[in-house]
Amino acid sequence: MTNPMVLPVGPPTQGERLEQHSGSDFSELSRRIAAAGLLRRRPLYYTMRFGLVALALAGCVGAFLALGDSWGQVFVAVALAVVFGQLALAAHDLAHRQVFSRRRPSEAGGLLVADLLLGMSYGWWMNKHTRHHANPNHEGKDPDVSPDILVWSRRQAHRARGLPRFVGKHQAVLFFPLLTLEGLNLSFSSFRALQSPPVKRTVLEGTLLVAHFVVYFGGLFAVLSPAKALLFIAVHQALFGIYLGSVFAPNHKGMPMIEEGMRLDFLRRQVLTSRNVRGGVLVDVFMGGLNYQIEHHLFPSMPTPALARAQVITERYCAELGVPYHRTGLIASHREALRHLRNVGEPLRAPGGGLTGS
């Protein structure tokens, strides 16, 4: 298997420049995918999937009300963390128009699921996620590899100051503990984003976000004692954050980083920076289809149930082209991501802490 950390790029040849301009390699793959009927909508699948998530959410609410002021609510908090993870995956599919082909129903569904049910700004997240899809693992362009707290490359480690410099020294060990705060971070970032241009419907989204937290905190403190309510929030938010991180981290973390000056066509930019995770039906459900990350990045609007067939076609096509295609198990994917975090943070553990004059 090819080393996923080796990025075969350099000054483009004339042939590569022509290929980048024409996009012929991706066009051929797109033709094969379309011929297999993998881009058509799957309304029955999404009706069943979203219906099951809605039933699970209703079940959590029912169990919460039935248990009342009980320490047993911690089990409801665990279940609700899983449901929130599935809601986040539903919002993701709606944002990519995998469910509806038209913008308005996709946007309405996204606002309902993300803002009202999850407490996360749909407009802010969609802007951020769109930039990630356009330039995955690109330093300076992909917001998911910005050195806000963690550093994702040796270059970022050498330039790190403040919190990223402190955390970066031991970021592989701190990664999962930090994920416990991810759910709260998404909500905090959402409220902060209401004052910035990416969020166009600030009044609507602000109203939905406030409604979410009024019901969330109001319901908890109305039914539970303060101590039990705080425990519920801690367990629910921590496990929700870990769930999100466990779904999204294996997709790109530890895969090659793209720097300014590197020139890759669309197909190679998406394939070389993404990792697929195998594992069967359980992994498919757990990750909501994002375990087929390569195919998802190549065809973002492809419905989830079509990704498995697209994976076979794409892997074979990449083999024809000689393009490295990385696929591994769930545990191995996390191991690769953590190894990468440890390696890029090494300059911060060296004498002098990796400080440079740059």
Image (tube, grey):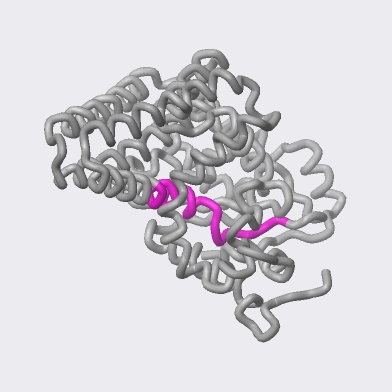
Residue 139: % across, % down:
71, 54
Residue in the picture at 32% in, 30% down: 218
**Which residue range is magenta in the image?**
241-258
Q: Looking at the rendering, which quadrant does residue 150 occupy?
A: bottom right
276 relative to 57 in the view: left or right: right
The location of residue 44, given as percent across then percent down, is 34, 19
Give the number of callouts: 0
| Vertical order, 85 against 16 (above or below) | above
Q: For the view shown, which residue lies furthest in the right direction?
A: 14
Which quadrant of the figure contains the C terminus?
bottom right
- In the image, taking residue 289 as reference, residue 13 lies left or right, namely right
Task: Name the residue nearer the viewer: 274 or 117.
Answer: 117
**Percent of width and height locating residue 35:** 53, 26
| Left or right side of 45 for 72 | left
Decide if residue 307 is in sight here.
yes
Residue at 78% x, 75% y is 356
Query: Does 225 lie within the magenta span?
Result: no
Q: From where the camera sits, is residue 37 visible?
A: no
Q: Is residue 205 above or below residue 79?
A: above
Q: Which residue corresponds to the image point at 48% horizontal and 24% vertical from the top-left? A: 110
Corner quadrant of residue 81 = top left
The rendered magenta stretch, by its main secondary structure, is classed as helix
